[in-house]
C-alpha cells in the first residue's frame, strides 16, 4: 500500500524523468532543424547535378549506355544493400520498420545479399533476419561527421564494383514525410547503367536552348558523376538522421504526456492520502476528547 513518503518519492522520480525527457526533446528539435536545412539545400544541389548529367547526354548525343556482360548468372551475382539506421534507442519503430522494409525488398531481388549497415540497432535486427552484415558503420552524431562517412562508403563501393565483386548497390533509408513521421525508401545506387540514364532523363531540361559543355567532355562527366554519387549518399544519410530525430521527438512527446498524466495521478493520490491521514488524526483527537469527557 502506498504511503505519503512512498508517493513523495515516486513524484520526485517522475519529475526528474520529465526533466530528462524535456532535455531530449530540445536536443532532438535542435538536430531536426540542422538536418532539415541540409536536406533542403541538397535538393537544389542534387537537381543541379542531375541536370548537368542530362545536359552532357544531350550535348554529346548519347543514345544509350553499353553494359558489361559478366560471366556470372543472376543467382551468383552479389547485391549490396547500404542501410541507414540508428545507434541509439527511443526512436519508436524507426529501426523495426527499416529492417522489415529491407527484408521484404531484398527478398524479390535475385542473387546473393551483402549488407553495409550504418547503425548498431538496425544491424542487430537485420542479423536476426539472417542477413550477412559485412560492414558496420557508426551513425554520424552531427552534420560535420556525415562527409567522412559518405566518402568512406563511396570509395569502398566504387572499389568493390571495379573489382566486379559486387554487381549492384542499393540504398535503404527513412525519408521524412511532408506532414508528420517518415517512410522507408529504396534507391538504386550503382551501377550507372541504362536504367539509371532513363531515370535521369525524366528530368526535363528547363529551357528550349540546347546545352553545351564548357571544357573537356570526359573530366566534366567524371566530376558530375562523382558529385551525383556523393550527393545521393549524403542526401540519404541526412534524410535518415532527420527522420531519426523526428521519430525520437515524437516518442519524447508521448513520454512527456505520459509522465504528466502520471504526475497528476500521483498528486491526486498524495492529496487524498494526506487528507485521509488528517481526517484520521482529527477523528482520533475527537474520540480521545469524548473519552476524556465521559471519564470526567
Image (cartoon, rainbow, N blue to C red):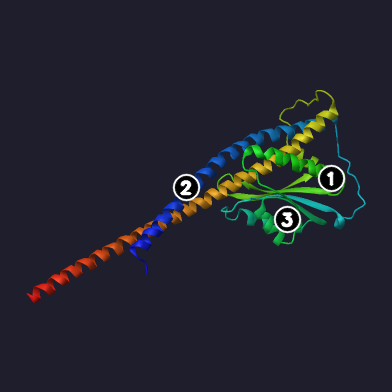
Q: Of marks 2 and 1, which one's residue comes earlier in the chain? A: 2
Q: Which mark is residue 105?
A: 3
Q: CA distance from mark 1 to mark 3?
A: 21 Å
* Left or right: where 43 falls relative to 262: right
Q: Of marks 3 and 2, which one's residue comes earlier in the chain? A: 2
Task: Tell me the quarter of the picture where residue 280 sits.
Answer: bottom left
Q: Which mark is residue 161?
A: 1
* Of residues 43 and 126, the one drawn nearer to the viewer in this rendering: 126
Residue 242 picture location, percent across and down: 60, 44
Residue 35 picture location, percent across and down: 60, 40
Would you place residue 50 above or below residue 177 in this image? above
Q: CA distance from mark 3 to mark 2?
A: 37 Å
Q: Of marks 1 and 3, which one's residue comes earlier in the chain? A: 3
Residue that carries the numbered disc 2 in the rendered image:
22
* Of residues 151 and 72, the one drawn nearer to the viewer in this rendering: 151
Task: Tell me the quarter of the picture where residue 130 sits.
Answer: bottom right
Amino acid at each position: 500500500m502506498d504511503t505519503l513518503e512512498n508517493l513523495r518519492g515516486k513524484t520526485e522520480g517522475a519529475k526528474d524523468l520529465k526533466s530528462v525527457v524535456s532535455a531530449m526533446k530540445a536536443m532532438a528539435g535542435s538536430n531536426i532543424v540542422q538536418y532539415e536545412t541540409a536536406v533542403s539545400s541538397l535538393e537544389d544541389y542534387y537537381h543541379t547535378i542531375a541536370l548537368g548529367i542530362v545536359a552532357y547526354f544531350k550535348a554529346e548525343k548519347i543514345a544509350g549506355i553499353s553494359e558489361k556482360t559478366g560471366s556470372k548468372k543472376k543467382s551468383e551475382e552479389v547485391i549490396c544493400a547500404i542501410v541507414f539506421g540508428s545507434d541509439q534507442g527511443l526512436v519508436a519503430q524507426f529501426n523495426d520498420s527499416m529492417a522489415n522494409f529491407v527484408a521484404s525488398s531484398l527478398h524479390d531481388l535475385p542473387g546473393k545479399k551483402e549488407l553495409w549497415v550504418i547503425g548498431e540497432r538496425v544491424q542487430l535486427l537485420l542479423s536476426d533476419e539472417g542477413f550477412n552484415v559485412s560492414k558496420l558503420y557508426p551513425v554520424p552524431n552531427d552534420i560535420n561527421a556525415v562527409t567522412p562517412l559518405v566518402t568512406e562508403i563511396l570509395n569502398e563501393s566504387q572499389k568493390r564494383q571495379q573489382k566486379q565483386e559486387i554487381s549492384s548497390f542499393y540504398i535503404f533509408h527513412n525519408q521524412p514525410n511532408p506532414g508528420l513521421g517518415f517512410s522507408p525508401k529504396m534507391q538504386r545506387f550503382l551501377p550507372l547503367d541504362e536504367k539509371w540514364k532513363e531515370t535521369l532523363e525524366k528530368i526535363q531540361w528547363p529551357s528550349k536552348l540546347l546545352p553545351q559543355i564548357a571544357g573537356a567532355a570526359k573530366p566534366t562527366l567524371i566530376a558530375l558523376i562523382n558529385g551525383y554519387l556523393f550527393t545521393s549518399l549524403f542526401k540519404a544519410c541526412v534524410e535518415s538522421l532527420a527522420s531519426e530525430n523526428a521519430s525520437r521527438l515524437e516518442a519524447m512527446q508521448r513520454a512527456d504526456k505520459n509522465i504528466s498524466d502520471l504526475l497528476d495521478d500521483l498528486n491526486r493520490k498524495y492529496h487524498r492520502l494526506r487528507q485521509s491521514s488528517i481526517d484520521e488524526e482529527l477523528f482520533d483527537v475527537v474520540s480521545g476528547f469524548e473519552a476524556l469527557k465521559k471519564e470526567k
